[in-house]
Amino acid sequence: MLNEATTVLILITFMAAAINGGLGYGFSSITVPVVILFYTNRVLNPAIVIIEVVINSYILLLHWKQINTIFKRIYPIVIGAIPGIVLGAWLLSSVDPGWIKLITFSFLLPIVLLQAGGIRRPIQSEKAAGLFLGTGVGFFYSVTTVSGPPLAVMLNNQGLVKKEFRAALGVIRLSLSSLTAISYYYLGLYQEESFDVLTAIVPSVLIGIPIGTYVIRKVNPETFRRICMSFDAWFVGFGLSRTLIQLNLLQSPYAYSVLVLAILIDSTLLYRYFKNSNGYCTPVVT
């Protein structure tokens, strides 16, 4: 019989896999904020990383023709990610899990809200920014397994078209997940409980990704993305509030002001989007 943690894990990873199938990213950023309320990052991350190696290989296989077009623009991100991954993996192996949760949620919330708001500001010094972004993303990916939202902000800003965007995400995220998986191995982070989590996730991924790929063909991609990131913002806000309570940094009910603030900001962004476009605008990229 399934316990509460496993039930939540299966349901949220199915939802996350469907979103990833539609957007090309989102599996970790949807899964992690909810599931780390039941599992520590040290247990969850190794399972997520292995899943993401497979998911990102699949995405890259679908868009391999675009690799030559985008590689010169994204290789600084891949190079910059290497030292960040090594530092982040070491931190994960040595820092208290509660503080890792706080880092995870504090990093995620502003990035997810940027995604929900559809904010785009083209970057002029793309290679220099790519190195800097790569180091930061590599660090936070190896600590949290989340990289989709910040990478999507960067790639959306730079105006990549749909297939180029997905190919770029595939190359970068496959590099991140592969290098992180290797780092975890050398640091001895793989354990039996992680493989139990992996076993529970696999069916959700196999079913969810094809469903998301189908759904995105039937709805407006930008509307789908905004709604997905909005739910993500609510999850992250709740997780951050709970973590503040667990670490005794804020007491209930005051800690939930973070969740309320996230909901208010996100609701305002969604209202502005639907008011200005009626949900049918043509996105720059998805």
Image (tube, rainbow, N blue to C red):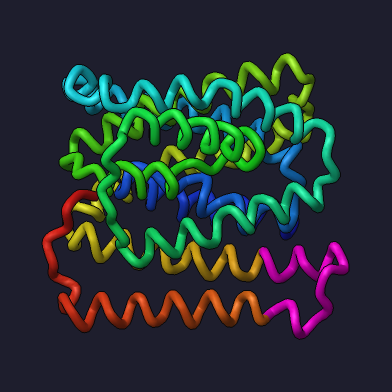
Please tell me how many numbered marks the rendered image carries.
Answer: 0
Tell me: 271 left or right of 200: left
Is residue 190 or residue 10 the one in the foreground?
190
Above or below for 286 versus 37: above
Residue 255 covered by magenta stretch: yes
Identify the residue at image location x=30%, y=42%. 155
Residue 126 location, quadrant: top left
Is residue 273 or residue 23 the one in the foreground?
273
Tell me: 112 left or right of 4: left
Is residue 195 or residue 63 the one in the foreground?
63
Identify the residue at image location x=70%, y=71%. 241
Does residue 208 appear in the picture of this structure?
no
Residue 60 location, quadrant: top left
Q: Position of residue 176 (x, y in %)?
A: 50, 27
Q: What span is in magenta?
A: 240-256
Above or below for 131 versus 144: above
